[in-house]
Image (spheres, grey):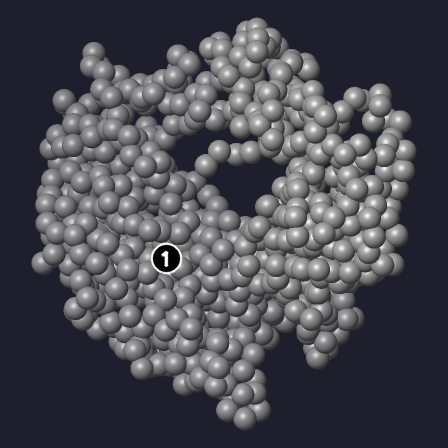
């Protein structure tokens, strides 16, 4: 669909317009004829015209644009525009693109104005005006076409203007709209600008400024860079006022832009293989200009006297290189952009058939402390061995210690994970972990399944859901054990990665169906499934999900095929993590405090050569009867608090692990995965507060959990939302909490974020 750029202010003659005037129409006799929706009785249309900026009209939940409000002015006026004061607190529900209709009878409407309200940022709450030539009218209709950052439209106060100097002439206003003009290169060919009047009258065009000329509606660039402003004009006639509109686009000197190229292939480690075998070299290349102007045409590898072209995949390139000999090889990797510019990186690789056991360090004494340098997240890049067929086992050793900071170790069991970045930029979980209660421990996990990703230059990230005082210090080493593997090649494909409600009456089976394509080259295939249950208490039926003994099912093409008993014995601790405080000895759903959460492995080998649908079904008979989505839940009767919010949730990570004696490459079949890499920006108003406040954050869609924590990290309350708009329109009430410092956390499949709040 084409983007349309609307007229912001309709002008006839600049000098004549300057002699005109706009004055507010007195609102004492106004009334609301119609609104398309209203959030509640506290957000009625009448609040847009009551003279009080603290009260607003706000559209209803789940109602998308366009939005509409109609006003009866009580008498006819020479109407010449409107002013909209957006919502002042919170600052959401801003209308952007709009049209203004006028009528004398409230039945027959003509569009007389419109445009796009511009906001400097999300906190811009200034009055926005849209004006036009005066029209005699009693009724006004404002049609909101799009919003600034969400699907809601709100008006704190509406102003209507009249012109007592330039009286109505009986003519109507025209709206001129442009089709989008994309940015251009200095050497681009002439092109046509397309615009139209809503009454179909002929337009003329002119260049206001910038490196271009125009003949009729054909624009010719001069060859210089800069911003071009184009004006469309309509002279008007006895029936319609003159009108004009402008549009800008940028002309860019594309010769100044060069591609960037990187590779995970490094010369810090040799390439180890028992014989000369194919090895995938992974490459990324990009250029910081729109693909409409410049793109990466190809990536070549110069190896000796030969040139090879890399294969393009979704988000990366690869070349399957079989060395011609052992010894040193120079590889030049060249990215070629469509503007002819190139970028080259070189690698000097020693290919060897000599290798032995080795331990390689990654994380080293990394401290994760809430509010510190690594506040819940850590990112780091490390160099690892490169090989094919040289190692038959990879073991990860995770050393968790109490850091030398105030508070030492965090006192509580915290959900954590360690991920590695795949060639396409997706984060793949390597380790799921729950921290101990206030002590340090050592852990070990077989990570051979990830050998295809634990090579070359690898980016790691760590997340620990830590709060308040204390933290954790992590060291991660990987042992590479020399030996001939059953299969020299492997791959990892992500099937599921996210948090899912458990027992939600509105959606008892929330995990998406995943279509797994198991190519013929695969000789062994497994589903590696990690799931840990969280949430507990009397308001969760069965004390779920943390303490609910559950049986889940994996269906293949609709047939129940595997059963997962999600219940772990925690006493004795499976990782021999001793000395803990708290309730470490209680069995839990898929995890234990102070232990790596072990994955469950399911054999998919019988399905090689086919494409199958995988479904992960939660315990079919479980329902959380105290869930706010249960219509039969009654606080104080069936449950103590149906809106408690600390509902059961599962953190699910499912991966397809494939093995083969033939080369297989990452990306042949990519799952519907979630990067979960965003760090949400959160603002709270007012803060400090008396316990009543609103929360605002980056735009999101889909199930999102908001949790409230005490300063020691204890969870106080949870809420669930389906959009950032729904969140920002919720008035939180924590007035029953004691004065002090608390933390708000937001998390979903896309990311997480934290903000401190003070309750006075």
Name the residue furthest top. 222
Front-most of 349 and 544?
Answer: 544
The image position of residue 426, as x and y in percent, is: 38, 45
* Residue 689 in view (yes/no): yes
Spot occupied by residue 425 in the image (x, y as percentages of width and height): 39, 41
Q: Is residue 30 left or right of residue 67?
A: right
Circle 1 packing at 10 Å, graded few (<14), some (14-19), many (20+), is many
Residue at 70%, 23% in the rendered image: 237
Residue in front for this viewpoint, 362 or 178? 178
Q: Percent position (x, y) of residue 337? A: 39, 18
Q: SS of the residue at dot 1?
A: strand
The residue at the point 65 percent across, 59 percent down is: 35
> Is 418 on the left or on the right of 249, as rendered?
left
State the quadrant of the C terminus. bottom right
Asked if residue 486 shows in the view, the reply is no
- Pick out the residue farthest to the bottom: 637
Q: Residue at x 59, y 57 (%)?
A: 725
- The number of callouts visible is 1
User: At x 17% / y 43%, what residue is drawn?
Assistant: 489
Q: Which residue is label 1 attached to?
A: 497
615 left or right of 75 in image: left
Q: Give how far across and how far down residue 389 sits, in percent.
A: 16, 41
Q: Is residue 238 above or below residue 586?
A: above
Left-right relation of 681 to 337: right
Query: Depth check: 720 or 27 in front?
Result: 27
Relative vertical location of residue 279 with respect to residue 553 in this rendering, above or below: above
> Residue 316's image quarter?
top left
Q: Splitting the image into 4 quarters, where does residue 640 fall?
A: bottom right
């Amino acid at each position: 669909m084409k983007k349309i750029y609307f007229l912001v202010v309709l002008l006839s003659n600049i000098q004549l317009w300057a002699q005109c005037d706009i004055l507010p129409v007195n609102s004492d006799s106004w009334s609301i004829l119609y609104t398309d929706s209203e959030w509640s009785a506290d957000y009625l249309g009448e609040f847009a015209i009551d003279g009080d900026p603290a009260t607003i009209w706000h559209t209803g939940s789940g109602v998308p644009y366009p939005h509409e409000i109609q006003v009866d002015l009580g008498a006819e006026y020479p109407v010449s525009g409107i002013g909209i004061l957006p919502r002042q607190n919170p600052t959401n529900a801003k209308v952007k693109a709009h049209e203004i209709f006028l009528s004398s009878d409230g039945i027959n409407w003509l569009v007389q104005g419109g445009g796009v309200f511009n906001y400097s940022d999300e906190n811009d709450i200034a009055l926005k005006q849209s004006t036009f030539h005066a029209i005699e009218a009693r009724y006004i209709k404002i049609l909101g076409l799009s919003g600034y950052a969400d699907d809601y439209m709100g008006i704190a106060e509406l102003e209507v203007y009249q012109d007592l100097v330039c009286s109505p002439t009986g003519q109507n206003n025209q709206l001129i709209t442009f089709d989008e003009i994309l940015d251009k290169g200095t050497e681009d060919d002439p092109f046509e600008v397309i615009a139209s009047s809503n009454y179909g009258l002929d337009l003329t065009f002119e260049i206001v400024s910038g490196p271009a000329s125009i003949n009729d509606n054909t624009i010719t660039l001069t060859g210089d860079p800069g911003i071009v402003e184009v004006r469309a004009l309509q002279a008007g006639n006895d029936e319609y006022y003159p009108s004009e509109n402008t549009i800008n686009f940028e002309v860019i000197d594309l010769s100044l832009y060069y591609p960037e190229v990187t590779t995970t292939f490094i010369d810090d480690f040799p390439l180890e293989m028992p014989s000369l075998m194919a090895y995938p070299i992974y490459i990324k290349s990009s250029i910081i200009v729109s693909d409409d102007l410049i793109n990466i045409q190809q990536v070549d590898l110069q190896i000796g006297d030969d040139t090879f072209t890399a294969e393009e995949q979704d988000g990366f390139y690869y070349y399957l290189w079989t060395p011609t000999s052992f010894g040193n090889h120079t590889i030049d990797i060249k990215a070629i952009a469509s503007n002819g510019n190139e970028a080259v990186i070189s690698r000097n690789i020693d290919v060897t058939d000599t290798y032995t056991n080795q331990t390689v360090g990654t994380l080293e004494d990394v401290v994760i402390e809430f509010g510190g340098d690594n506040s819940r997240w850590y990112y780091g890049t490390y160099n690892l061995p490169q090989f094919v067929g040289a190692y038959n086992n990879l073991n990860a050793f995770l050393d968790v210690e109490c850091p030398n900071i105030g508070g030492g170790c965090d006192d509580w069991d915290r959900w954590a994970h360690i991920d590695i970045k795949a060639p396409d930029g997706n984060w793949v979980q390597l380790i799921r972990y729950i921290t101990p209660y206030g002590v340090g421990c050592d852990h070990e996990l077989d990570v051979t399944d990830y050998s295809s990703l634990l090579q070359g230059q690898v980016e790691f990230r760590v997340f620990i859901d830590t709060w308040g005082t204390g933290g954790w210090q992590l060291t991660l080493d990987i042992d590479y054990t020399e030996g001939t593997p059953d299969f020299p090649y492997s791959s990892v494909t992500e099937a599921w990665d996210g948090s899912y409600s458990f027992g939600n009456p509105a959606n008892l089976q929330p995990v998406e169906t995943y279509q797994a394509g198991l190519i013929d080259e695969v000789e062994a295939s497994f589903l590696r499934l990690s799931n840990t249950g969280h949430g507990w208490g009397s308001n969760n039926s069965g004390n779920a999900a943390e303490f609910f003994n559950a049986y889940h099912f994996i269906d293949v093409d609709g047939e129940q095929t595997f059963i997962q008993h999600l219940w772990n014995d925690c006493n004795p601790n499976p990782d021999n993590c001793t000395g803990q405080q708290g309730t470490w000895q209680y069995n839990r759903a898929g995890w234990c405090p102070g232990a790596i959460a072990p994955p469950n492995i399911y054999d998919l080998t019988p399905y090689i050569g086919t494409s199958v649908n995988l479904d992960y079904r939660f315990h079919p008979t479980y329902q959380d009867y105290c869930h706010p989505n249960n219509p039969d839940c009654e606080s104080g009767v069936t449950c103590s608090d149906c809106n408690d919010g600390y509902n059961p949730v599962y953190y699910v990570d499912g991966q397809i692990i494939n093995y083969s004696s033939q080369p297989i490459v990452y990306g042949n079949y990519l799952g519907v995965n979630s990067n979960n890499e965003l760090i949400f920006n959160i603002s709270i108003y007012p803060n400090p507060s008396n316990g009543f406040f609103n929360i605002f954050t980056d735009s999101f869609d889909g199930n999102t959990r908001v949790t409230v924590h005490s300063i020691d990290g204890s969870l106080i309350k949870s809420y669930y939302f389906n959009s950032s708009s729904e969140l920002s329109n919720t008035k939180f009430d924590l007035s029953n909490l004691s004065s002090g410092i608390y933390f708000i956390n937001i998390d979903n499949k896309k990311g997480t974020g934290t903000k401190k709040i003070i309750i006075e």
